[in-house]
Image (spheres, helix red, strand yellow):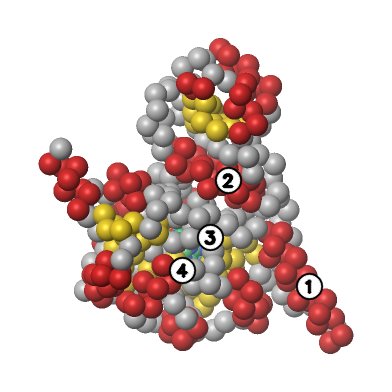
Amino acid sequence: MVRQRQRASNIHPVTPAALRAAAARLRRGQLVAFPTETVYGLGASALDETAVAKIFTAKGRPADNPVIVHVSDRKMLRSVARQVPATAMKLIARFWPGPLTLVLPKKSAVASLVTAGLDTVAVRMPKGLARDLVRLTGVPVAAPSANLSGRPSPTTAAHVAHDFPGLFVLDGGPTRHGLESTVVAFDPPRILRQGAITEEEIRDFLGKANRAKAAGGQREGRLARGGPRFRAGPAESPGTRYRHYAPARPLILFLGRKDLFAYAEAHPDALVLCPGWLAPFFSASRVIPLGDSIEEIARNLFAALRTRRRGRELLVLAVPRRGLGRAVMDRLERAATRIV
Ligand code: TXA
Ligand code: MG
């Protein structure tokens, strides 16, 4: 009981005073968890090596997995990135502030722990409260997702408090997208991690920007072809090397509905995570409906992976690999102990 009260006192509903307190903590080199439009982040000043080291220690994150730097404006972007390619400028004009992270040549002011010694830095300008916090802090904020390394990303303050009891958490309610930002590298532009902005949106936008330029005959800035199964190699996207998003029990990902039905029938002690339309086929006591649209499924996925409900294993039905479905499938494949 006492423990719970203590924990709750570290969770601060968003008020101007709480925002100021969070910014002051960041400036002093302390950690703060805060909501972004994607998932909750575990932040520290990106210019303070000692502060960034605390992130890695708290998460148990391998030192070779670099962290995203959050900026509030273009001036702050220029303080961390040495150069911004033309295609990146276009993407910034279209998608920032928002869930798009760009991998750019780094400036030396950025603590080298942030970038795991790489000469590039991943930068994004978040939308809303997280941007307000960075602006108030006055320095770029390094922040990976606020979960223990390997666990599902947090989409509520309670998820953060579960992984880090006692940590200062700004509570802005459940996050909007529920999936992390899309990570894009240059040049040529290519997606290193599928995320809240879809490959189709980026491809369409760059395609249109190109056609508008066609009079000049130049065709820079097309998104490199990867296809639905495109995944950057470990050298390019260090985070992809590790198992991620793992729930506390086995997760089986089913590519077909029939296999899911058969397995669920034979294993009545398993929980089923599925789209809303499929939920009525299972008894209410064992099903977690994820939602009807792919946006809802994306928003609810990580909370469902953290469910406290009883069940020996989690059974999840695949979604079509298009739009946000690509990011959802990427997370499910990484979370799965088995794919059937
Ligand atoms: O939505 C998000 O992106 C959230 C919120 C808090 O902003 N952050 C997030 O951070 O998901 P994290 O650390 O969980 O994931 C960062 C990803 C990892 O896959 C990492 O390998 C990649 O970005 N990354 C970071 N810096 C990189 C770099 N210089 N080159 C290539 N990949 C990089
Ligand atoms: Mg993460």
Q: Which residue type carries mark 3?
A: Ser
Q: Which residue is mark 4?
A: 128
The residue at the point 64 percent across, 28 percent down is 278
Q: Which residue is mark 3?
A: 181
Spatial CA distance of label 3 from label 2 is: 16 Å
User: Crowding near pointer 2: few (<14 within 10 Å), some, many (20+)?
Assistant: some
* Circles 3, 2 touching at the beta carbon (< 8 Å): no
Q: Which residue is mark 1?
A: 208
Label 3: element kind: loop
Q: Which residue type carries mark 4?
A: Gly
Spatial CA distance of label 4 from label 2 is: 20 Å
* Circles 1, 4 touching at the beta carbon (< 8 Å): no
Foreground pick, 99 / 11: 11
Q: Which residue type carries mark 2?
A: Glu
Spatial CA distance of label 3 from label 1 is: 22 Å
Image coords of residue 207 (percent x, y): 78, 70
Q: Earlier in the sequence, mark 1 or mark 4?
A: 4
Q: Quadrant of the C terminus?
A: top right
Foreground pick, 304 / 61: 304
